[in-house]
Image (cartoon, helix red, strand yellow):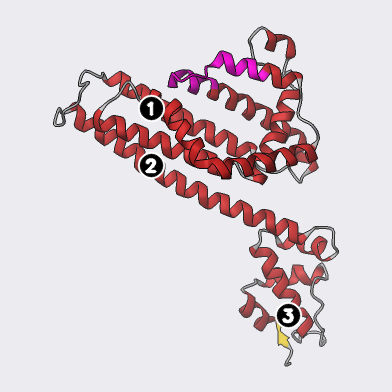
Amino acid sequence: MTKRTSLEIRKIFGFSRDDINRLEKSKVIKPQKNGQGIASEYSEKDLERLLDVKLYLLGGLRISDMEDLFKNKIDSGRTISEHIHLYKKRIQMLEFIELMRAEIRKFKETNRVRETKTVTLTNPNTKKNEIDTYEDQVWDALGLFFDLSFLCRGESRSEENLKEDKKRTLKRTLEAYEKLEHFIDKLGIEINSKMLRECLIEMASEPFGDDSEIKEAVMEWVEEYRKNKTNILDQIEKKGIEPAANGLDGAIQEQYKSILRNIISFFLDYFIDEEELFYLLVNVRYFLDHLDKETLIKGKVMIQ
C-alpha cells in the first residue's frame, strides 16, 4: 500500500495538525521521517492505529487519553461501553424533556380553556391557585428526577475532584430526599413523609452490603420489574395517579393524569436499569453512612 502523507491523514480522519502532532508525540503513531522539510509518511500500521483512535474518540475518549489507552492503562472496551450507555441515557433524557415540555404546555392550555368556561366540567369551581398547586407538583417531580439522574452517574475518575464530588453527592441526595417527602405529601396517596422517614431510619440501621451484593440485588430487581411491569403500572395508576388527580375533573384531570403517567413510566424505565440503579444505590449507601443518626431518630434528616 502507498504510504500516506500528514495532509492525506488529516483529510481522511478529520484530524487537525495539532491532533496529529500530539499523537506522534505520545508515540501512538510513529511515522517515518524523511528529513528536514520533508513530510512524514504513515504506514499501513499507522492507519490501522488511527482507525482505533477514531473509534475511541467517537466512544467518548479524548486525544489526551490515547497514550494511556495504547499502553493498556485504560480498559477501552469498558470505557466505550460506559460512554455508549451514557449516550443512550442522554437520548432518553432529551426525549423525556421534549415530552414534558409538550405536556406542560397542554396542561396550561387546557386550564386556560377551563377559565374561559368554554368547556363543561363536573367541578367548575376548582380555583386557579389549586391548579397552580398541581402544576407545582409536576415541577417537584421533575426536580426529583434530575437530582436522581445526577446520582446515577459513575464515580469520578479524578482523585483531585473526588472530595468535592462526594460533597455534591451528599447535597444532591439530601435535596432529592426532601423533594420526595414534599412530593408524596402533596399527592395525597397512601405513603406519606412520616412513613418515608421511618423507612430511612430502618435503612440507616441496616446499611447496604458491598458492591457485589448491591449488583446482585439490582439484577434481581430489574428482572422482577421487567417481568411485572404491566401489573406494577396498573397498581401505580390505582393507588397513585387516580387519587392524586381527584381534585380535578374533565379535560384538565385527564391532562394531569397523562403527565403523571408519563413521568412515572419514564422514571421507572430510566432508573430500573442495572447500571443506573447500581450507582444510585452506591450513592444512597454513602448518604446513609453520613446521616446524623441522633437527629434522624427525632425526625430530622441531616448530614453529619
Q: Secondary structure at mark 2?
A: helix
Give the extent of the magenta segment. 181-200
8 over 291 or under it: above or below: below
Q: Is residue 100 left or right of residue 130?
A: right
Residue 279: x, y in percent? 69, 39
Q: Callout 1: helix, strand or loop?
A: helix
Q: Position of residue 46 (x, y in %)?
A: 77, 79
Q: How far apart, in angstroms, are the residues tagged by discs 2 and 3?
A: 46 Å
Front position among marks 2 and 1: 1
- Disc 1: which residue: 242
Left or right: 216, with 153 as reference point = right
Q: From the viewer's perspective, is the residue at label 1 or at label 3 nearer?
A: 1
Residue 87 located within the stretch drawn in magenta: no
Residue at the outermost left position: 118
Q: Which mark lies nearer to you, 2 or 3?
A: 2
Position of residue 167 measured from the top left corner of the image (x, y, whole percent): 71, 29
What residue is disc 2 on?
Answer: 101
Q: Residues within 10 Å of mark 2 (few under 14, many from 20)?
A: few
**Secondary structure under the numbered disc 3 in the rendered image:** helix
Q: Is residue 167 visible?
A: no
Q: Quadrant of residue 174?
A: top right
